[in-house]
Amino acid sequence: MIKKILNPLDEHQAKDLIESVLPDILVRDIGLSMLADGIIEANFHRRDNWAVTNAYSDTIWFQVGHYAAMTFEKKKIWLALDKQLIEKPIDNAIPFLSANEYGWEPYREGLSQFKDKHKPGIPFSLNGYYLPVSYESHGEIWPYMRRLFFEFIFKAEYGGQSTMLPATKKIHTPGILMYLRNKKGMHIPDPLYQ
């Protein structure tokens, strides 16, 4: 079982790591679709400000600006969502607290929320684990979660500590994107670093 991708261009190492981190086929399939959605959204805003990495053993990180937007770890999907839209929903959004029924579990440790460095003490995200229960329940909750996820990506791109560290760009792992493209059968962009 692989814990770390040694060659960032190796799609097979990426596949082995992702399958070991998310061994459940349902969770992996849904997680990869969510990752693809997040990458496309981040790339729409800024092509040079996101990366997918394996900076830590047994973990895949999707980084937007200075923030982790999503990780695959501990057999679950860790996700950052916009806190403002959770607290003050618009449209006909379901009360987000009922998302627990769909497999959402707020993170209670260190990165339970991100704060804007320009507005100290004001959190702009609610972070947690998502463990999809079924394709059907994911289809019900994902449109609402996606809106919260995309709003977080927007804020990570343009607010807070929006600039990605050069060191993060250096550890971007293209092999993960190769695996994602082949697995999902869709175009996934590459970041464009200067």
Image: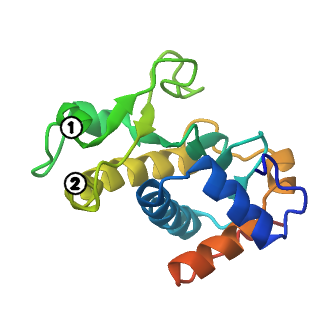
Give the number of the disc on residue 101: 1
Instruction: Describe residue 151's horizontal placement relative to residue 84 as left or right.
Output: right
- Give the class, few, some or many, for how many residues have Cα within 10 Å of label 1's Cα (few <14, many ≥20): few
Marks 2 and 1, the one that precedes in the sequence: 1
Residue 137 is labelled as 2
Q: Viewer-proximal residue, 152 or 145?
A: 145
Element assignment for label 2 = helix
5 up-or-down from 110: above or below: below
Q: Position of residue 108 (x, y in %)?
A: 46, 18
Q: Position of residue 96 (x, y in %)?
A: 21, 37
Q: Disc 2 to disc 1, how far (Cα)?
A: 9 Å
Residue type highlighted by circle 2: Ser
Dot 1 amino acid type = Glu
Residue 140 percent coordinates (x, y)? 19, 57
Residue for point 68% across, 70% down: 177
Where the C terminus falls, by quadrant?
A: bottom right
Disc 1 secondary structure class: helix
Rendering quarter of residue 51: bottom right
Q: Reply above or below: 132 against 9.
A: above
Mark 2: few/some/many CA within 10 Å (<14, 14-19, 20+) = some
Q: Nearer the viewer, residue 181 or 159?
A: 181
Residue at 64 percent across and 37 percent down: it is 161
Horizontally, residue 102 falls left or right of residue 50, namely left
The answer to whether the residue labelled 2 contacts the one labelled 1, judged by CB atoms less than 8 Å apart, is: yes
Residue nearest the observer in this picture, 91 or 120: 91
